[in-house]
Image (cartoon, rainbow, N blue to C red):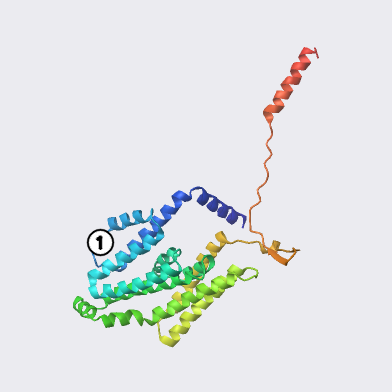
Amino acid sequence: MTKLLEIREFVKNFYAKYENFIVPVLKFLLAFITFLMINAKLGFMEKFAKFPIALILALLCSFLPLNFLVLAASAMSLLHIYALSKEAALVVGIVFIILFLLYFRFSPKDSVVAVVLPICFALKIPCAVPLTAGLLGSPGTCVSVGCGVIAYYCLHFIAGISKSGSEAKMTEMATKLKSIIEGIVTNKGMMVAVVAFVAATLAVYLVRRMNIDHAWTIAMIVGALLNVLILFVGDLALNTQVPVLGTIIGTIIGFAVAYVVKFFAFNLDYARTEKVQFEDDDYYYFVKAVPKVTLSTSERKVKKVKAVNDNTEREDGKNRKSGK
């Protein structure tokens, strides 16, 4: 445990010292991965789905606010969809506009959640996002979580259409706006996922604010179980074809990721909890103080060897003058 705490302190001190360099690098990596995954999943506009373009856009996003990454990723997705079908681009564009209105109204500071969630879906660990968002975010973060889920399912639906039939069939289907709208809006799997992820995020937020020991750990357990429960109940009720084994494994991995975040952001020593009572003219206070887990640094004693030698030389000089 001591070694883990040493690593934790080293990482925190390293980040605090080089924050001005680390943040742009992390933003670049996030943007670069996002653009590469969009090109890999959609990639209908071949001239735009090239490595240098993704690299240049990622470099640009590394020096701009994260909200620019959200806009750039949406614009890139719409360009690829436009190359496939103008009608599909119109429908997805309207959905994105509605999501932007909700996002910028309720949670404009949670852009990382909206970007990371589709990536975690592709990595089969989407549960990590609602658990982490509930630990570090606010109730408004639920909006970003829901927007991220809807954005992923929209792109997944378009990518699925392109692989389901011939190009002629695609063109015929794209001309029917009603079919595309129904395919996106009435997607049962998307609706269940939105409910599950938003409920998990809100549950984690509410439980971790309770005045109980190990509140953050209990909140993660409650959120993970609630997320799995809603997904499985939705599968039984609406036949959303949720993979049981994949969902359980993804939830376990997501819980591990959230626990690592909790270790760095909120690590308390409940064994040394203290309860304090005091009063003033108007109120009587009951305070529960839980100390953070920290490493005790031993005091170093420095011996001034030079000063001792100087004193010895002075005494020797005096003895010589006195004839001793």
Q: In front: 197, or 281?
A: 281
Q: Quadrant of residue 263?
A: bottom right
Q: Is residue 88 left or right of residue 273?
A: left
Q: Estimate the x, y position of residue 301 in percent, counting from the top left.
A: 69, 39
Q: In front: 263, or 20?
A: 20
| Quadrant of the frame with the N terminus | bottom right
- For this orientation, the residue located farthest to the bottom is 237
Q: Estimate the x, y position of residue 83 in percent, counting from the top left.
A: 23, 69
The answer to whether residue 95 shows anywhere in this view is yes
Residue at screen point 41% across, 80% down: 191
Badge 1 element: loop
| Quadrant of the frame with the C terminus | top right
Residue flagged by tag 1: what amino acid is it?
Answer: Phe
Q: Estimate the x, y position of residue 70 in percent, counting from the top left.
A: 37, 64
Residue at screen point 41% across, 67% down: 104
Q: In this view, does 123 lie to the left or right of 13?
A: left
For disc 1, the marked residue is 48
Q: With respect to residue 29, does 106 lie above or below?
A: below
Q: Quadrant of residue 259?
A: bottom right
Q: In front: 38, or 74?
A: 74
Residue at screen point 53% across, 53% down: 11
How busy is the neighbourhood of tag 1: few (under 14 within 10 Å), some, or many (20 plus)?
some
The answer to whether residue 253 shows anywhere in this view is no
Q: Is residue 174 left or right of residue 102?
A: left
Q: With respect to residue 13, does 251 lie above or below?
A: below
Residue at screen point 26% across, 75% down: 88
- Looking at the rendered structure, the number of numbered marks drawn on it comes to 1
Q: Estimate the x, y position of residue 213 in percent, counting from the top left.
A: 65, 69
